[in-house]
Structures are given as C-alpha cells and as structure tokens.
Amino acid sequence: MSVELLDGVRQWLAVSGGEPTPARVAQALREQGRVLGDAEVLGAADRLRSELVGSGPLEPLLGDASVTDVLVSAHDRVWVDRGGGLELTGVAFSDAAAVRRLAQRLAAVAGRRLDDARPWVDARLPDGTRLHAVLPPVAVGCTCLSLRVVRPKAFTLEELVAAGTVPPGGDRVLRALLRARLSFLVSGGTGTGKTTLLSALLGLVGPGERIVLAEDSAELRPDHPHVVRLESRPANQEGAGLVTLEDLVRQALRMRPDRLVVGEVRGPEVLDLLAALNTGHEGGCGTVHANAASGVPARLEALGTAAGLDRAALHSQLAAALSVVLHLVRDGSGRRRIAEVHVLERDPAGLVRTVPALRWGAEAFVQETGWARLRELLGGEGA
C-alpha cells in the first residue's frame, strides 16, 4: 500500500474519529475509491493501529527483550543496542514526517509538549521507557528519537556474572559490599550499564530493609519487597510544579530509609546525599557519570562547588561519606563490564582521591594496591 494511500486513510480516520479497525480502514479505502483484498486491509489496519496507538515501526524492536536502546537518526536509519554495541536495523519509517508524528504522539502520551516552540522533550512513558526527542530544524534533516527501554525485571547478579559484566568470583566482593553496608557509587559513561548493575545489587539487600529511590527518571527496578520510588517532575507551562532531585533527596530522608539511593548524582542533590551519608544513613548508593573511577572525586567536587559548598568542606564530607567506587566500561566488543573497584582516601593536602583495589581480569578480579584497605572495609570478606 502506497504512502499516499495510507496518508489518506489516516486523515479520514482523524476526521471521523475512532480506532483503525479493519472495517473502518476498509470504509476509508472505499471513500477514496479503492477496494483492496482482506489481507491488504488487515495489513493496513495493523500498520495504522501501531502508528496511532503503538510505537509504529519501532513496535517489534521495543518488544524485543534483548534491546536496551532504540535510536532513530533518520526515517530509514534506526539503530538498536542489545548489549553488544549499536546495530543498524532494517526498520524504516515511510518518511521524516512519520518520525515527527510518532515523537509528538509519544510526548503527548507522557503528558509533555513537543512542537516548534518547544522542539525537544525528555520524558518517561507509562511503561517506564525513557523518551528523548528533538524536532527539526534543531535536529537537522529529521526528528531524532531516543528510547531507553526499562525492563520490568532486573537482572540478577548471577546473570551479570554469566554475561561477563562481573568477573567470576567478583560477586563475592559485591555481596560483601552490601553486607558491610558501605556507601558506594557506580560510575561510568553513558550506556555502560550503571543502572543495570545498581538494580542487581539492590536486589541483594536484606528483605527487612526499606529502600528509598530518588531519581530524575524512574529507571531502577530492584527485585526487592520494600522499595519506595520517588521521581522528579518538570515545571508546567506556567512554570509551577517543579520537583527537583534535590527535593526528593530531602523528602526521602524523612521516610525512614535503610538504604537511600540516588539514581544519578548530577546536581546540587550531592550536598544532601553527602550530608545524609554522614548522619547515620549507611549503605547509601547511586550512580555518577565519569570517564574513570579516579575522576569521581573531581566530578563530585564540581557538582558540590557549583551548589555553593567550598572545596575543603566538600572533600571533608566526601571522605567521611563514601567508601567505594565501582567503575563500568564498554569494551571494544561492546560488552559492559566492571573495569575497576576503587577505595577512597585523603591525600596529604586533605583532598579525596581514589586508590585502585581491584581491576578486571578474565578469570577473576586482579588485586591492586588498595585491596588491603577494601578487604578491611569488607570485614575480611570478599577474598
């Protein structure tokens, strides 16, 4: 069926209202002087239903349990990530206008505006999928659409060992980290699996503990019986109703958390998190963007000073609040894995630095200079 004919059916349905059932699609075709066979009518109905109430050509990709990201850079350039790097698919839209329509409809489903006056959107769909879209002319040539798929079931630590994210035997260290109630951050670049690893680790927390999550976009899915999830909210068109991650951390502290978790530390909420970890809230954790574990103190320093905390005070709080950094990378084959485990210490000037304790090895973690300190923090476990 031609693009022009589908557009005609789409317009007829928009004017008349109602769902694109086979009977209504057949009626729309008759109105345009076209009579098609049953198979063609059913195909047109399925395609229109997917476009109008589903995710269009992306539907099968989003339904694929192995897909974590779907990226559209042109109407005929659709990429996916299945954990091994980006792959170009054979999926295509009819034209650039179809990509724009889908992006605007998904934004509307998320309760957000996407048009020429507000040409980008960052939102969460009802099923948890993270949506980001940018319209032309800001996106040159075609609407750019990024969908981060959040699966309802978190990976277990055993599954991450089997997938090669955690080296053999490395799960003993991570279990000991949780049992010792050490505060830690999972660091790494975009798409390295920080959220996946943190969700798996939170699933190891004892069932009698209360986990309170504070996130900009609710992506963590720990397999745990007692989880409270808080999500930030943008201001409405009148500029009211803004709820920041900083607000959420403060509210979380009033909710008797046994484990306070910040989905991604990237703003002034770092001050409240460090303060909480220094006032009896052991075992807190979160993620942070960093290119290396050694860069985490500088990253937190930049966030803290931007929020008004002076350098010396920030490092003083950081030294007392945080114990361990787990750093993830995506290697040359596209596999996500824990590259390093660092402990934190203060240098002679009083500034916090990280010391490598473990690094990736194909057969097991390889011990580094900070291993003795990490083992001490773990109470002698994890060897």
Image: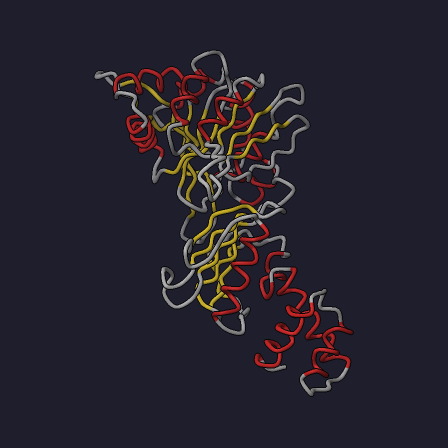
Quick one: 349 or 158, which is closer to the camera? Answer: 349
Residue found at the very far left of the displayed protein: 349
**Where does residue 283 sit, x and y in percent of width and height?**
51, 20
Residue found at the very far top of the displayed protein: 280
Please state, as top left, top right, bottom left or bottom right, where the N terminus lies in the image: bottom right
**Where does residue 99 sit, x and y in percent of width and height?**
51, 65
| Residue at the spot 64% in from the left edge and 43% down from the top edge | 152
Instruction: Find residue 293 and report its image quarter.
Output: top left
| Residue at the spot 75% in from the left edge and 73% down from the top edge | 24
| Residue at the spot 65% in from the left edge and 33% down from the top edge | 223
Colouring style: secondary structure
Q: Is residue 252 left or right of residue 266?
A: right
Quick one: 371 or 133, which is closer to the camera? Answer: 133
**Where does residue 217 sit, x and y in percent of width and height?**
52, 40
Numbered marks: total:
0
| Residue at the spot 49% in from the left edge and 41% down from the top edge | 236
Quick one: 191 or 92, which is closer to the camera? Answer: 92
Quick one: 11 or 162, which is closer to the camera? Answer: 11
Q: Is residue 10 left or right of residue 186?
A: right
Instruction: Find residue 196 and report its image quarter.
Output: top right
